[in-house]
Image: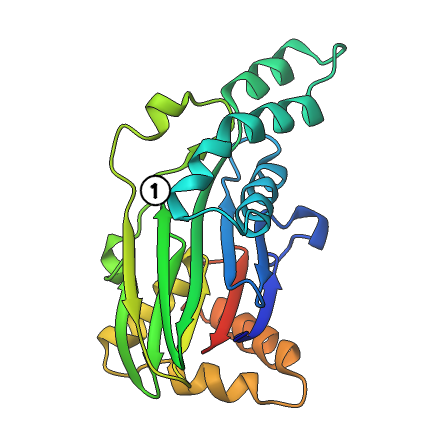
Amino acid sequence: MASRVHEFWLPRRGSSSEEYEDAFARDAAAGRFALADGATESSFSALWAQLLVNDFVQNAAGDLDDWKKHLPGLQAQWYASVHRPSLAWNVEAKLEQGAFATFLGVVVKYAGSIPQWDAAAVGDTCLFHTRGTELFSAFPVDRSDKFNNSPRLIGSRTSPEALWKNSLPCIQASGLSGDRLWLMTDALAQWCLLEHEKHDGPWPRLDAMLHEPEPDRALGAWIDELRSSRQMRNDDVTLLAIEL
């Protein structure tokens, strides 16, 4: 049973679409969804983020833990794509440090009509499970004050041993038909948790915009307003809204 999905992305204000450094991939039929947020300070982070999400979604035969085994190959692919013999020394040094990104991968399956999902995360790209106005879970960050400028990241030049020295946050959960999963990068996720903590849950508002004749236009105008009023940080925004 395939879930219905709406995808939305918007670069930070003042940046072009070519400067967008988030990445997402989805295969609703296979029930695999992924988001990543490339770290602006690192080189070629958008490419690294895209490699991470594409591999997770295309690896439909593997479980959540299996994608970690692919990282050395993805690291080699990233380096081969960006390295050139004639690079200036300072660019070469930056490449040796690598690119960095947060990551969220979700696998949705159905037991009859009951949706079930597994999720794994590195950093502060978030998954929310809602039913109507109620928030059932927030993963891996569950409070707005837990966001900071140094989330855990996956590096394109970091050894696998260093990457996984800490346990990988994972969840398993289930819901009901009609529930929603919201996958978001950090700026939007933090705003949603702030609203939730004020008991002014954002979920009906988000859901209403998805039902607009032009949902992307509605979402874009709304985020622009939040940025202008400084309610939301000016950062790339990516959203996958999954109706189960």
In this figure, which colouring scheme has been used for the structure?
rainbow
Q: Residue 51: percent from the left, percent from the top?
A: 60, 40
Q: Residue 47: percent from the left, percent from the top?
A: 63, 38
Q: In this rendering, is residue 139 above or below 116? A: above
Q: In the drawing, does residue 222 fall left or right of residue 112? A: right
**Residue farthest along the right direction in this orientation:** 86
Quadrant of the image for the C terminus?
bottom left
- Residue 42 visible to the viewer: yes
Q: In this rendering, is residue 110 above or below 164? A: below
Q: In the drawing, does residue 238 fall left or right of residue 182? A: right
> Dot 1 corresponds to which residue?
151
- Disc 1: CA contacts within 10 A as few (<14), some (14-19) or many (>=20): some
Q: Amino acid at mark 1?
A: Pro
Question: How many marks are shown on the rendered structure?
Answer: 1
Q: Please tell me which residue is depicted at 40% across the width and 48% down the height of the picture.
A: 64
Q: Please tell me which residue is depicted at 43% across the width and 65% down the height of the picture.
A: 108
The quadrant in which residue 95 appears is top right
- Name the residue nearer the viewer: 174 or 163: 174
Q: Please tell me which residue is depicted at 70% across the width and 12% down the height of the picture.
A: 88
Q: In this rendering, is residue 44 above or below 88? A: below
- Name the residue nearer the viewer: 133 or 176: 176
Q: Please tell me which residue is depicted at 41% across the width and 54% down the height of the picture.
A: 125
Q: Residue 23: percent from the left, percent from the top?
A: 58, 51
Q: Residue 14: percent from the left, percent from the top?
A: 64, 55
